[in-house]
Amino acid sequence: MIGETAGEQIPDVRLCKRPAAWPLLGKIGVLMVTAELTLGGLLVLAMIAVSVRGWLTLPSDARVPIRHRFGGYGGYLSKTAGLVAWPAGGIIVYGLFVGVFVEGLATHYRGTGATLLFMPVVLAVLTTVQVGAIRAAGRSSGRG
C-alpha cells in the first residue's frame, strides 16, 4: 500500500492486475461470442464437407469456378485446387475474425464481441457460393 496518511490506505494501482477480459463482455456477451465462434466453426466444417462431396461427385477433369470479383466467376481451377480453395478461404475468414477478437480481448476493449457478428454471415455466404460453384462445375463437366 502506498499513500498511507492518517490511517487511510490507498491501493497501489501499479500492482493491481487488470481483470480477465471475459468479465468485460458480461454473461450474455460470453454466450454470444461462444455461439458465434461455434457457428463459424460449424460453417467452416460445412465448407469442408461440401468440398468432400464435390470431390466424390465431380469427374476428375472437372474445373471448379472461383470468384475473383462480385460480377461473376473470375476463373476456373482444377478439381483439387478449386475444392481446396473454397474451404481455405473460409478458414482464412474465420482466422481473421478470431484474430481481431483475440486482439480485442488482449487490449481489454469492451466492444470485442461486436466484431464477430458478421463472421457467420460471411461464412454462410461463402458456403452458399461454394455450393453454386460446385454445381456449376458439375453442369459444365456433363454431370449435374
Image: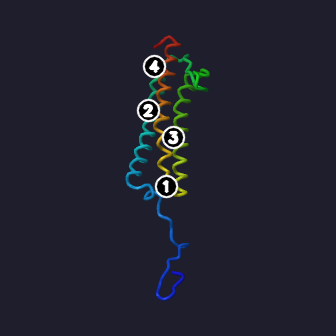
Give the residue pinned by disc 2.
46
For marks 3 and 2, the one nearer the N-term is: 2
Disc 3/disc 4 C-alpha distance (Å): 27 Å
Q: Amino acid at mark 1?
A: Arg
Query: Mark 1 Cα within 10 Å, few/some/many (few <14, many 20+)?
Result: some
Which amino acid, by three-letter code, is at mark 3? Tyr
- Name the kind of residue labelled 2 in the image: Ala
Vertical side of 44 occupied by 37: above or below: below
Looking at the rendered structure, the secondary structure element under dot 1 is loop
Label whose residue precedes the other's in the sequence (1 or 4) = 4
Q: Secondary structure at mark 3?
A: helix
Q: Is residue 48 above or below residue 1?
A: above
Disc 1/disc 3 C-alpha distance (Å):
21 Å
Q: Which residue is mark 1?
A: 110
- Of all residues, the one furthest to the bottom in this rendering is 6
Mark identifier at residue 94: 3
